[in-house]
Image: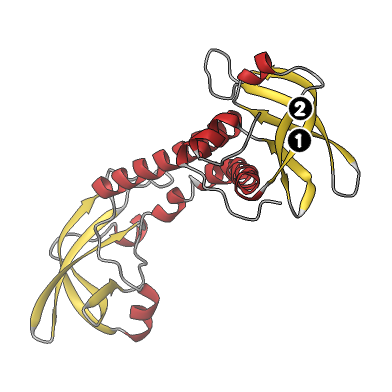
Amino acid sequence: MNSAQRSVTFSTIINILKKRPIAIFFAVIFAFFALLMATIFTLVFSLTGNDMPKVDYELIDAQGIETTAEISNIETDYTVTVNGLHPTVISYQYIEDGQAIESEYKVLEEVKIEALAAGDDITIKSLNGQSAIKNIKPYHFPTTLFFLAPIPFLLFGLPFLLYIIVRTSKELKLYKYGQVKSARIVSIMPKYTIPFVSIGQGVKVHYEYETGDGNKIVGESVTSDFSIISDKRTGDTILIFVEPDNEYKSCVVPKLDALKNNWHINFE
């Protein structure tokens, strides 16, 4: 039993990942679209986002001091449409603690403001430097809802990512701690996953080996070592890694990776 941990290089991990190109493809695609949507929304909102002062309307309405403000400008925001309506930006100024304060307030209630004009007085409530027009709630563009859009893509990609992590971790565990055993080849066949590219190609090997308690197990493993096809035949012996704690888990010892990682395994 090999108790010492074998070293595994990054190239070996890449070779393991290449065995699962379909899962990697979908995981990358879903992650890409989620990132793309988040990036687009961030850029859009940074250019056209709500630059109005954010106020706690409920707090100001409950605890604010009522005062009078003068409207300096009223402007329609045509960049946003909600149920056929455009928000209106009301600019006003008022006196607080002897100082003139200018502020803006975006609303979506045309009926309540249709009679207002620049120069008119309005009633506001102010609290700690913030203010709100009395009886009119402010409008804020619901940017949070748009940033929820990438979540479905992440959820669709999550199963593929988990599959990759679990399967790669299991194979790495065999590479690092697996017990080297001999097995008899039952069948060898090429494996082609994605046409015209090398990603996913390999050799699927079925083999039979015996556990410590005498049970015969037929295992299956995919290796990127195509030399097995020319060097081995059905019935020949091949080296495998067997998990010490669960002899029913195994994989073919990758000859090229064994040499690159200096595992000092004798293949003769």
* Closer-to-camera residue (111/129): 129
Vertical arrangement, residue 173 with respect to residue 101, above or below: above
Q: Quadrant of the C terminus?
A: top right
Task: Say which amino acid is labelled 1.
Answer: Ser
Vertical arrangement, residue 1 with respect to residue 14, above or below: below
- Label 1 SS: strand
Q: In the visual, does 173 lie left or right of 181?
A: left
Vertical arrangement, residue 59 with respect to residue 112, above or below: below
Q: In the visual, does 49 lie left or right of 97?
A: right
Q: Which mark is residue 182?
A: 1
Any part of residue 124 in sight:
yes
Q: Position of residue 112 (x, y in %)?
A: 34, 62
Residue beneath the point at 40% across and 76% down: 58
* Dot 2 crowding, Cα within 10 Å, few <14, some 14–19, many 20+: some
Q: For the residues marked 2 and 1, what is the alpha-carbon distance in whole angstroms? A: 6 Å
* Closer-to-camera residue (4/77): 4
Q: Which mark is residue 237?
A: 2
Q: In the visual, does 196 lie left or right of 144?
A: right
Do labels 2 and 1 touch, CB within 8 Å?
yes
Rendering quarter of residue 258: top right
Q: Position of residue 108 (x, y in %)?
A: 35, 56
* Closer-to-camera residue (230/52): 230
Residue beneath the point at 54% across and 23% down: 199
Q: In the visual, does 18 lie left or right of 39?
A: right
